[in-house]
Image (cartoon, rainbow, N blue to C red):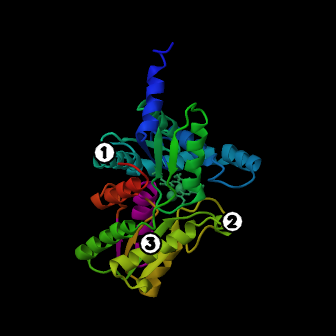
Amino acid sequence: MAAKYRALTDNAHDTVKTTPKVGVLITNLGTPDEPTKRGLKRYLAEFLSDPRIVEIPRLLWLFILHGIILNLRPKQSAKLYQSIWTEDGSPLLAISRRQRDAIAKALDPKVKVALGMRYGNPSIASALAELQAAGVRKIIVLPLYPQYAAATVGSTFDAVSKELQHWRWVPELHFLSGYCEHPSYATALANTLKEHQAKHGTPDKWVFSYHGTPKFSLEKGDPYYCFCVKTTRLVAEQAGLNPDDCITTFQSRFGKAEWLKPYTEQTLKELPAQGVKNIAILSPAFSADCLETLEELDEQNREFFLEAGGEQYHYIPALNDRADHIELLVDVLRKAGAA
Ligand SMILES: C=CC1=C(C)c2cc3[nH]c(cc4nc(cc5[nH]c(cc1n2)c(C)c5CCC(=O)O)C(CCC(=O)O)=C4C)c(C)c3C=C
Ligand SMILES: [Fe+2]
Ligand SMILES: [Fe+2]
């Protein structure tokens, strides 16, 4: 008996004597397993059933979701995903894996780094199981959303805590809740703007397009909108831009309700008539390029702007696995106790 439980007690003893073994869980939204109607149906069913994502009365929403949305949207969304799918699969997943590997390389090899997606695969449960198998006693969770929103960071907290309810020996937990105020975040984004400027010159306007949320989330106290406005201000300061040359907009509206404004699509359709013909657009709410940037911003919105009389439209990629981005994330993790 004693021998059987030796490892457990030794581990407990080590935990008291030394600092606990640390694991890092990085997360992002998630993506379908395949760009097909079937893949999208499975992914959207999980995603859109999350009460943090759609906040309308539960029974009514489940009726609309299963009766209408999941019969129409999977086919449309599958087509969009097919247009951005790569040999490595979904760009969001491929980039997230590169981010995980680069973070693991920069940290002490004793720190185990796992990737879990809020919806789809690899799941948060599987990533936590990897950390558990590595014997970690402290977990630092870093959701890769720079600006806190209940729909993203809040929902990730729900998923992590739900999974940990099944653990007998709950680890020490450090849950990070947005990092857009870290000075190196604005610096990294400003670097991308300066690199763009050196290559293509100064545009008439810099458009900062953030993923939207319903307007009522702001009215109920979600700070996401305020973090977005602050991000634009901090990046403009870092890049030495005139604030009047920077526009903050919100994209990816879902459903008929009012979302945060101004809408990116409408702004892009109006700018050429105001004499703004050359723009550079970036999407700081995304730490990795994904459907919402590669298809919606770089394809659909480009067309809207050019059709309305715009002449030059430049999409500036997300920070992805750039060295300055990885350094920032590693610094955030070190401050939370990762070696
Ligand atoms: C239904 C409401 C939605 C809210 C609220 C929402 C908030 C939100 N989402 C992101 C990040 C991403 N969203 C992505 C795709 C996506 N988002 C919604 C809906 C809401 N998002 C849908 C239905 C979809 C799926 C695509 C589609 O069918 O149109 C993605 C891309 C995923 C990928 O695989 O590439 C990301 C990332 C944030 C940051 C956010 C709130 C701040
Ligand atoms: Fe979204
Ligand atoms: Fe979209």
Boundaries of the magenta span:
287-316
Q: Under tag 1, what secondary structure?
A: loop
Q: Which residue is mark 3?
A: 208
Residue 135 included in the magenta stretch of the image:
no
Task: Name which residue type carries label 3.
Answer: Phe
- Label 1 or label 3, whichever lies nearer to me, is 1
Residue 236 x, y percent position in the rendering: 39, 78
Mark before the other along the chain sequence, 1 or 3: 1
> Which residue bears the numbered disc 2?
220
Q: Quadrant of residue 198?
A: bottom left
In contact (CB < 8 Å): disc 3 and disc 2 = no
Label 3, secondary structure: give it.
strand
**Image mark for residue 108:** 1
Q: Is mark 1 within 8 Å of ligand 1?
A: no
User: Residue at 40% across / 32% down in the picture?
Assistant: 134
Residue 98 x %, y %: 32, 47
Question: Residue drawn 41% across and 83% down?
Answer: 245
Q: CA distance from mark 1 to mark 2?
A: 41 Å
Judging from the image, what secondary structure is the residue with disc 2 in? Answer: loop
Of mark 3 and mark 2, the one earlier in the sequence is 3
Residue occupying the far front of the picture: 17
Q: What's the amino acid at mark 1? A: Asp
Residue at (59% x, 43% y) in the render = 161
**Residue 314 is at least partly visible in this image:** yes
